[in-house]
Image (cartoon, grey):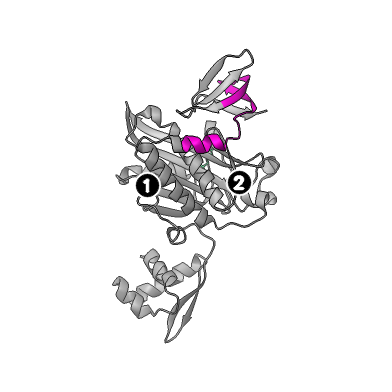
């Protein structure tokens, strides 16, 4: 109900009276007043003038449903949207509640993530409200062998969304977004399946947006980066969230109807690794190779020093650009 009150105030250019809101929502004026007070506590500046009503003066920089939905053009992705001030991990949270949502497209986003998880059991620094920490739940009707490609569908969506903001980025096969040789974004895809049936896939996305260098802890200060550090601008996080979801729905719909080529072309044409000398790390063992291409199936085609060619599948390997 609080969100509905907020929506009405945000959508009204001028003053709106408590009476009008209470009639629209079928709640008492006392209840409206309570919700307004709680909305103010969230950081919204609302003016109340007797005889006129309420008017919004300033919104906090939040990635809540109201802020994101005004840019959202999707049919299903992000149409169920849960926003938290603080969570341990959006991937863990969405897994807990996935069973309550039969349709795909649920998004869970938190302002601060206290126990963010990265790939290969690593932690993901996200205890601040300057990035995007979110998870998307989908239920693709695909074979489990196809699921690994979703990582690239997501990477391509983020690349396309960044382009709409005039941001040049590269995709480090298969799951990192790089700007000026720095990792800005990581993707963690997790699947829940039985035999060959996928119950759901959780796509975790972490993007450093408005952090300054001093916002990062000492041990990662020199390696971590953000859009702000790279481009010197402060970004509207809610708009980036919506743009990513818009692009994701488009590429995901294509992918699940048999068109992986669009994604693959974006990943290939904007690859950070193709043409470079890389270390392929399988089970802790490093091998030097040249990244030759990304295949039609989304594998990384590499050539080792002894000229052996191999197609790498996501999940098996880690790639380090030399
Ligand atoms: C990586 O190691 O590169 C992947 C990082 C993924 C981080 C995101 S932040 C939102 C989601 N929730 C998590 O706990 N992790 C992912």
Does the residue tagged 2 have its C-beta within 8 Å of any atom of ligand 1?
no
Label disc, if present, on residue 105 of the rendered structure: 1
Classed neighbour count for the residue bearing mark 1: other residues with Cα under 10 Å, few (<14), some (14–19), many (≥20): many
Query: Magenta segment: does it hold 285?
Result: yes
For the record, the magenta segment spans: 263-292
Relative vertical location of residue 62 with respect to residue 120 in this rendering, above or below: below
First of labels 1, 2 by sequence position? 1
Q: What percent of the width, then of the height, locates residue 303? A: 59, 19
Residue at 57% in and 38% down: 270
Classed neighbour count for the residue bearing mark 2: other residues with Cα under 10 Å, few (<14), some (14–19), many (≥20): some
Query: In screen coordinates, is 83 left or right of 309?
Result: left
Q: What percent of the width, then of the height, locates residue 309? A: 55, 17
Residue at 35% in and 52% down: 75
* Figure disc tally: 2
Residue at 57% in and 22% down: 302
Q: Which residue ends up furthest to the top in the rendered image? A: 306
Of 1 and 189, which appears nearest the observer? 189
- To which residue does mark 2 refer? 168
SS for callout 1: loop
SS for callout 2: loop
């Amino acid at each position: 109900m609080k969100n509905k009150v907020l929506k009405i105030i945000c959508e009204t250019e001028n003053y709106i009276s408590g009476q009008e809101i209470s009639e629209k929502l079928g709640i008492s004026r006392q209840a409206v007043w309570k919700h307004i007070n709680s909305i103010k506590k969230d950081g919204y500046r609302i003016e109340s003038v007797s005889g006129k009503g309420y008017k919004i003066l300033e919104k906090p920089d939040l990635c809540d449903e109201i802020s994101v939905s005004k840019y959202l053009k999707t049919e299903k992705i992000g149409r169920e949207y849960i926003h938290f001030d603080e969570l341990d991990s959006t991937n863990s949270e969405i897994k807990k509640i996935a069973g309550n949502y039969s349709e795909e497209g649920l998004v869970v986003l938190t302002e601060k993530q206290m126990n963010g998880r990265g790939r290969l059991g690593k932690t993901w620094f996200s205890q601040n409200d300057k990035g995007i920490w979110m998870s998307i739940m989908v239920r693709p009707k695909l074979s489990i062998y196809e699921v690994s490609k979703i990582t690239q569908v997501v990477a391509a969506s983020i690349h396309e969304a960044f382009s709409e903001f005039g941001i040049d980025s590269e995709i480090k096969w298969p799951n990192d977004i790089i700007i000026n040789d720095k990792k800005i974004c990581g993707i963690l895809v997790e699947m829940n399946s039985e035999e060959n049936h996928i119950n759901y896939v959780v796509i975790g996305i972490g993007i450093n947006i408005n952090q300054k260098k001093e916002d990062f802890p000492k041990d990662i200060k020199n390696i971590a980066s953000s859009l702000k550090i790279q481009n010197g601008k402060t970004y509207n996080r809610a708009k980036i969230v919506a743009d990513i979801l818009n692009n994701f729905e488009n590429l995901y719909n294509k992918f699940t109807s048999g068109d992986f080529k669009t994604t693959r072309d974006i990943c290939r044409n904007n690859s950070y690794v193709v043409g470079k000398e890389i270390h392929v790390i399988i089970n802790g063992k490093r091998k030097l190779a040249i990244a030759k291409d990304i295949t039609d199936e989304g594998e990384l085609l590499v050539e080792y020093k002894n000229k052996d060619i191999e197609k790498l599948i996501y999940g098996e390997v880690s790639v380090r650009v030399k």
